Every structure is written in C-alpha cells, then in structure tokens.
Image (cartoon, rainbow, N blue to C red):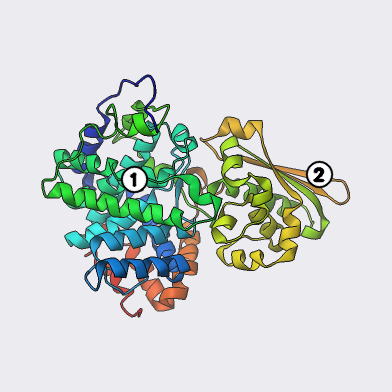
Amino acid sequence: MNAPETLVTMPAVTDTLAAFAAGLRFEDLPADVVERTKMLVLDLSGIIIRSQDFDSTLSMKQALHCLQGNRGSLRVMGSNEHWTPQAAAHLAGAAAHSMDFDDTHARAQLHPGAPVIAAAFAAAQLAGCSTRALLTGIVAGYEVMIRAALGAGARAHAERGFHPTATVGVFGAAAACGNILGLDATQMAHAFGSALSQSAGTGQFAVNGAWTKRFHVGYAASSGLTSAVFASQGYTGATQALEGREGFFNVYSPRPEPELAVQGLGQRWEIMESGIKPYPCCRGIHAPLDALTSLQQQHPFTAADVAAVRVGMARRSVFVVGEPQERRRKPRNVVDCQFSTHLCMAIALKHRRMGWDDYEPALLDPDIFKLMERIDVFEDAECEANFPTAFSAVVEVTLNSGETLRAFQYAPRGEPDDMPTQDAMQQKFTLLAQPVLGAAAAQGLYQTLMQLDADLPVDKLFDHCAHIA
C-alpha cells in the first residue's frame, strides 16, 4: 500500500470538510434534503430491525457481550438490549449492511447510510439530543463520506482492493457524531485525524462469503464515534488526514481527485444522489434484474423456455458480481448469493421476483443451479462507458425457439431520477420491520420516523422496541 510516485497537489480538504461538518445546522438544510434524509433513515431503520435475528448479528451480539459485560445504556433498532456507545454503533452498522439492502451512491461506489446513520443513532443517544440534531448530523456524515470517496478517486480506490463503505465510512461516521456532539472545526479535524488510523477493509471477504463485510461497516461506525468522542475530550489527531503526504488520498489511492471533495460544498448536496435499493444484493446486479423484469413483462416466456442468458455490464461490475463465473454459479452461502449475478438472475427467471427470503431456498434448489449454468456475464462497452455515473446493464435472453430478446437498462431503479414513492418506501419498511416488531409497533415507528424534523426527543425512536425481549 504505497503512496503514488508523484504526489498530487491538494487543496485543504480536511480543514474545509471539518469546518463544514462542524458548522452545519438544521436551518442550513434545504427542504428537499430534509425529506430525503428522512427517507434514508426510514430505509436503514427497517434493515437494522430485520437483521437482528440473523446468525451474523447473533454471533456479534455474543461477542460484544463478552467485551462489554452487562454495561451500557444505549439501544439499537429492533432490540431492547442495552449496549455501550461503541457496541451500539458497531452492532447497528453491521446489521444495517447485512442484507446488502442499504442505500448506495453510484459515483462514490459505496453505501453511505450504514456507517453514518448507525453511528449517528449512538451519538444522538449519548448526547440526548433531538431528532433534528440527529438529521443534521446524518447529513454532515453523508456529505463528508461521499466527498472523501470522490476525492480519493472512487474507482481507483475500489479497484485497489479496498471496501470503500468501510474505509471512507469511518470519516462519515466521525463527521456525523462530531456534529451531534457539538465539535468545533478544530476538534472535527482532530476526529478525522484519528479516523484515518482506523480506516480499514478490503474485498477479500468475497472469497468465502464471509461476514467480514458486515463487520467492516460496524467497525467504521464504532471507530467514527470513538474518534469524535476522543476529539471532544481534547485528544489530538493527525492533521491533513485526507490530503496529507501520508494521508488517506495519497496512501489509499493511486489516482486521487482531491478537488472533487470540496467542489460545490454546501451548494450541491451529495446526499440527494443516494439511491434506494429494491433488491437485497450488490448494486451491480440491480440493472440486470430490472432489464430481465422488463423482458418478462413484455414477452410471455418462462424459465423452461430459456436456452441461454447473457448479461453485459461494466468491467468493475463483472469483477465484483460476475467472475470467476464458475464460482458465481456455485454460491455456498447468503453472502455468495448477494454477489452472484447468476444466482439472482436464476431466481428472477424462475420466480419472477428476487427477494431476501428467496436466497436460502435457492441454495437447495437444483432448478436454480441448472438455470445458473445457462447464464453468462460479459463486459459490455456501452455499460463500461456509463460507469460509474450509471451502473448500466444489457440482458440478452435466447429462447429454445432460437429467438433472442434484448433489453438495456441505463441505471437501476431507485436512483435519484427514479426514486421509490412514499408508498413504496413504507411498504419496504413494513416488510422488514413488522416481522420483528409486530404490526402496531412497526406502524408507530414509521409515524415517528416521518416526524424526525419535528424536533422530537431522540429516545422516542427506540421506545417502539421496548416490548422486544
């Protein structure tokens, strides 16, 4: 992990972002930013709740209990257990990323909500603040996280093998927590300096479908909170954490683009570019699923009619969710499923849907494995040209009759130009939260989340989980 041979001349990115994050107030937020942030908090809350009984979450809870004992007073969505601040942030962050259902930012190639909102939930309880303060901190976190990724040269950073949601997430979490805890600009810069030393996570988890990917995001949330709390008590961190000679941009990326980190700061809100996921799998698989759905709606064919399927996408997407193809056709666990274009497309071919509850049955279904043998992934020139502005895909379905059907999807559903309706957001939240909370508590929490801008006590968010053992 060596710095670029020629260091890039950098603007004062760290201090600029620190001043912005520390100084941001609720009154500074445009109305559309407030409404979008409420939707993102709603979206992530449902995911955290639904993930509470997953094997990985239960294992993490046991480990955190070993580390913290019976101490702690903070709560996590979907659980009535009490945790220390660091444990609460870690658990919520990992749960938020467990379904791969959390929001994404295409150009930054990451999931901003999971580390930022999870950390903000913990900091807000620690501070005893209002829901308006929570919202403001979340916006600060999104802006810093996304802009830090863009400044690193998002594609170059990811292609080096890093997991950006983790490596950059710690800065976003620190910004969110620092804003909520009332850090000034100097303290915020110190928080970023401490966050730099905790920026970690690579894509090696994909080799065996490990839970490490989920751990990454919990660690980023917890480490960001830790960095902000340390700074609040006068602890100093490295200066120029982002743009310094041995800072994040120069060490973690071969081709940083630092000017992007501060371009339009305070005028263009990157949080508005986050997309909402309709499928619980890697974002690179979404456009293929949308294209296939379009073909299924236009033509009366079934899985039995299909001789072959070819899926074209950008080179990076092929690497992440398409190759090696023989392994993608033989997923061994749910994490493998979330990164297998072949598996997700086979489910959609057979069932004309693709949801969380389809994964485990698919792993035991010989029909699904036979369908995967007919699916090939390839790099498509048009999709490559569109990336990362859009995660495009082309799907070609050849029928047994010899006819080939083709559909091109420029961008997956849920991107800013095609956001889900309020009804669709409520439906997704209810689908996730109701099995855990029950109908009444899920509806009550939904109503509370829709009033985050009404300056409610933040503890009210967690009261709906009080009846859970």
Number of callouts: 2
Question: Disc number at residue 142?
Answer: 1
* 262, above or below 458, in the image: above
Residue receiving disc 2: 404
Residue visible at 17% across and 50% down? 230
Counting residues from the start of the chain, the first of labels 2 and 1 encountered is: 1
Q: Residues within 10 Å of mark 2 (few under 14, many from 20)?
A: some
| Residue 88, position as x, y percentages in the image | 29, 63
Q: Amino acid at mark 1?
A: Tyr
For residue 297, side relative to residue 155 (left or right): right
- The front one of 200 and 182 is 200
Spatial separation of the CA atoms under disc 2 and disc 1: 43 Å
Residue visible at 19% across and 40% down? 237
- The front one of 239 and 293 is 239
- The front one of 133 and 345 is 345
At numbered mark 2, what does the secondary structure look like: helix, strand or loop?
strand
For residue 227, side relative to residue 104 (left or right): left
Image quadrant in which the C terminus is located: bottom left
For residue 458, side relative to residue 78 (left or right): left
Q: Residues within 10 Å of mark 1 (few under 14, many from 20)?
A: many
Residue visible at 23% across and 59% down? 124
Question: Disc number at residue 98?
Answer: none
* 70, above or below 109, in the image: below
Q: Where on the picture, by quarter, is residue 369?
A: bottom right
At numbered mark 1, what does the secondary structure look like: helix, strand or loop?
helix
